[in-house]
């Protein structure tokens, strides 16, 4: 995931510092495992690169039913990578726990490109490693951020967003918990709920643009 973050950051920075956009405020957004990658990108960024961060149901803490056993991960690790592609990790039927709107669930579940097997050993070992890393470094977060989470999320723990909010050193930090909402706040909730989340994100961005964003020719 360090390489995923580094390559993504390289692309985003090429846009962020281009002549067309370098004078504008810039925000990084990450959802689910993308939230974990976003945090890794932030840790790899130079100070002042980003105006703020937004996380939607970020994967900072793995739920207990999906958490791989440390003993199993250690034993698989003794095989020197031979087990990394084995689909042998706990599977908690994530799609059903991620999507609350039944019509949207039908559409997403029918995607022929969606992986339906168990998580692979190497994937879960890397996720567990990186979750531990970011948890131990939340105190290094100083940039403004908003993290949002549904209280009924069965894929990523709301406690991860709470932990970030409590441990981050940022003077400007916001946490929003949506009662009864599941994992996919934007794609999987009924439209009225998804629109509420998007409106909250938009309002947060607008306020930070006014507060921190550099102005060019009298406009933001």
Image (spheres, rainbow, N blue to C red):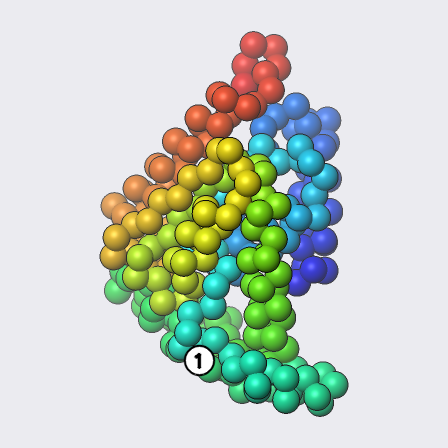
Whether 51 is drawn above or below 220: the answer is: below
Residue 111 location (% of width, % of height): 44, 69
Q: Position of residue 74 (x, y in %)?
A: 63, 84
Residue 114 in the image: above or below residue 37 = below
Q: Residue at x 60, y 82 (%)?
A: 73
Whether residue 82 is visible to the viewer of this picture, yes or no, is no
Q: Is residue 67 left or right of residue 180?
A: right
Q: Position of residue 153 (x, y in %)?
A: 35, 62
Q: Nearer the viewer, residue 25 or 113?
A: 25
SS category of the residue bearing label 1: loop
Pinpoint residue 2: horizontal percent, then vertical percent.
69, 60
Q: Is residue 42 left or right of residue 101?
A: right
Q: Residue furthest top?
A: 218
Above/below status of 13 relative to 80: above
> Which residue is found at the position 49% from the left and 28% from the top?
208
Location of residue 174 by image quarter = top left
Q: How many marks?
A: 1
> Can residue 131 be seen at all in this image of the molecule?
yes
Query: Within the image, what quadrant is residue 83 found in?
Result: bottom right
- The residue depicted at 48 percent of the width and 33 percent of the height is 172
Mark 1 nearby-residue class (10 Å; few <14, some 14–19, many ≥20):
some
Question: Is 76 on the left or on the right of 103, as rendered?
Answer: right
Residue at (58% x, 38% y) in the render: 142
Say which residue label 1 marks: 91
Quarter holding the N terminus is bottom right
Q: Quadrant of the C terminus?
A: top right
């Amino acid at each position: 995931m360090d390489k995923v973050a580094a390559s993504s950051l390289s692309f985003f920075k090429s846009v962020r510092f281009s002549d067309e956009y370098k004078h504008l405020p810039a925000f990084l957004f990450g959802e689910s495992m993308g939230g974990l990658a976003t945090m890794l990108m932030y840790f790899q960024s130079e100070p002042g690169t980003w105006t703020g961060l937004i996380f939607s149901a970020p994967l900072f803490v793995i739920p207990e039913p999906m958490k791989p056993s440390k003993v199993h991960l250690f034993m698989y690790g003794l095989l020197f990578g031979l087990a990394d592609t084995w689909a042998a990790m706990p599977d908690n039927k994530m799609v059903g726990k991620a999507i609350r709107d039944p019509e949207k669930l039908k559409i997403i579940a029918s995607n022929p490109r969606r992986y339906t097997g168990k998580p692979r050993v190497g994937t879960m070992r890397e996720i567990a490693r990186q979750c531990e890393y970011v948890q131990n470094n939340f105190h290094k977060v100083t940039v403004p951020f908003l993290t949002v989470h549904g209280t009924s999320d069965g894929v990523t723990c709301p406690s991860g967003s709470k932990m970030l909010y409590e441990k981050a050193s940022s003077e400007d930090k916001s946490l929003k918990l949506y009662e009864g909402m599941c994992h996919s706040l934007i794609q999987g909730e009924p439209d009225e709920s998804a629109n509420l989340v998007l409106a909250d994100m938009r309002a947060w961005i607008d306020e930070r643009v006014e507060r921190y964003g550099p102005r060019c020719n009298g406009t933001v």
